[in-house]
Image (cartoon, rainbow, N blue to C red):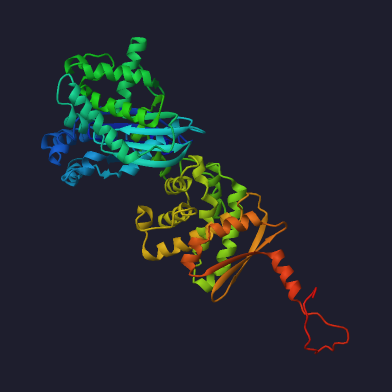
Amino acid sequence: MSTETQAAARPRLAAIDVGTNSIRLVVAEVDADGTYRVLDEEREMTRLGRGLDLHGRLADESMERSLEAIGKMKAIADGFQVQELRAIATSAVRESVNGRAFCREALRRHRVLIDVISPDEEAQFAFQSVVRHFNLDGRAAAIVDIGGGSTEIVLSAGTVIDQVHSLPLGAVRLAERYCRSDPLKPKHWRRLRKEIDRVLKRSLGKPPFTAEIMVGSGGTFTTLAEMIQCDRAGHSGSVQGYMITRADLRHALDRLRKAPLETRRQMPGLNPTRADIIVAGAAVVARLADALGTQQLLINDGGIRDGLLQSMIRELPGGTVAEPTPPRDRLEWVRQFAAKCRSNERHCGHVANLAATIFDGLQESCDLPPSGREILQAGALLHDIGYLINHSKHHKHAYHLIMHGELPGFSSREVELIANVARYHRRAFPKKSHANFRRLDRDDRRLVRHLSGILRLADGLDRTHTQCVACVACEPSYDSIRLVVDAAADPKVEIWDAERKAALFEKVFGTRLELVWSEDVESQAQLLRPVRWPGDTENSSKIGLCGA
């Protein structure tokens, strides 16, 4: 096989991660099934973010070191004849006033285009890597990547993301601020710990669940694993998938914070170049584990670079990674996502049908846009997926799960509308004081209010989750809207719950709502049916009531 044919059969890719503390390269060869094998790796600790927290800019010396490292890594990648090289930069370049100048210089000198990614993208890359290497099914997990400038946290229920947080708790940033004595004095340790706890409380608040496991990537995690390996076995090896307990972590942190810098540099498993920032990084891990109630920590050696490579593989021409057969319509994607979140499919599907029927009955008279119907159906199908996280505030969890989920075929605007409709299916009215609602434009806010009002009614009409309400008929008039409920048996619980949830509907539609059972309507019609008396002619005007 010629070199060209082999390259076409097994594309080679390279990824460069320009971090606050170090710059890393990975070169990989992609197999036909979408997996890859690493051909080469390189890492250089350049401390690009040194002094950034104090001065707000990248230091000239650090920039020069980093540019030289990028040049070397570009040469290595070229030597492997990679099909594509992608370079990303994280918090240091993202936050510095001269970050763009640094990227321009990398392009000018080495023809390396650096993509400065957002905190959410950074967290997503870390999450994609974990999902590839670890089985998260049925487990509440925290995926954590600690860099030099920031810490990215993904809270997930299995493979479904609930929350994403980017915190200014990088190992370099914290070390420069708080590690001001050697060894660390108790007062400096207290300040470091207090700052970490303050940021965690402000950003995480009360976590939505206890994280059964924490999967960590970045130099802090791998270093701690190597140290603990050396303590246990007398030597260190691969740390991929290595497990650390909370007791291991507390013991290692206690040793590190009480030891002088020179002693830390001699500790087995601890890279001497990381000795000055490891205390700060380990403190973040320990305080976060405490906050989330995590007992077991697993190490993911790939992290952001691995997630980046997976993204590149998916984008290869010809589709190297086998994609599932797409559903026939985009609501089928919604149903698949709902199933992934283990929602009550019968209940949510029935609510979606009822909501769509109400929408159809009101669309013309209330000037609802036709596009709102599918938004409403999707919101109804997903309105209860927040139970995957927990019952409390499940409507808010539904919003986050939808915003971070995969709904192919829907635009980002539509996904946000769906998430908001699901968010407001219970209790609180949509308000501009809510950040998620305030982000929408005026017309979209109006649409969310109307669709949420309809969804609340539809949800109430299946309060017992028995689908006893077969369908509804909508009868709008000038001063009220009447919903006639068709059910084989008296749906008094459903009507009671729908009436209880009708306040938003009545407010946004500016009318009074009346809910009646079709059998009652039929009985009333029978009572009002004209009756012909004996001897009456066909045109007789005498009218009586049945049973009179």
The single residue placed furthest to the right in the displayed view is 535
Image position, residue 505 (x, y; %): 50, 63
Q: Is residue 70 above or below residue 234?
A: below
Instruction: Between residue 178 and residue 25, name the one nearer to us.
Output: 178
Quadrant in the picture for residue 24: top left
Vertical placement of residue 143 versus 440, above or below: above
Residue 424 appears left or right of 187: right
Q: Is residue 148 left or right of residue 370?
A: left
**How far across and down, in percent of the image, does residue 38 sit?**
37, 29
Of 500 and 408, the residue lying toward us: 500
Total numbered labels: 0
Which x, y percent locates residue 442?
Answer: 37, 65
Image point 83% across, 82% down: which residue?
532
Most distant residue in the front direction: 548
Residue under the image location 35 percent in, 15 percent down: 229
Q: Quadrant of residue 111?
A: top left
The N terminus appears in which quarter of the rendering? top left
Occupied quadrant, residue 192: top left
Query: Where is residue 456 drawn, in percent x and y?
Result: 53, 57
Which quadrant: the C terminus?
Answer: bottom right
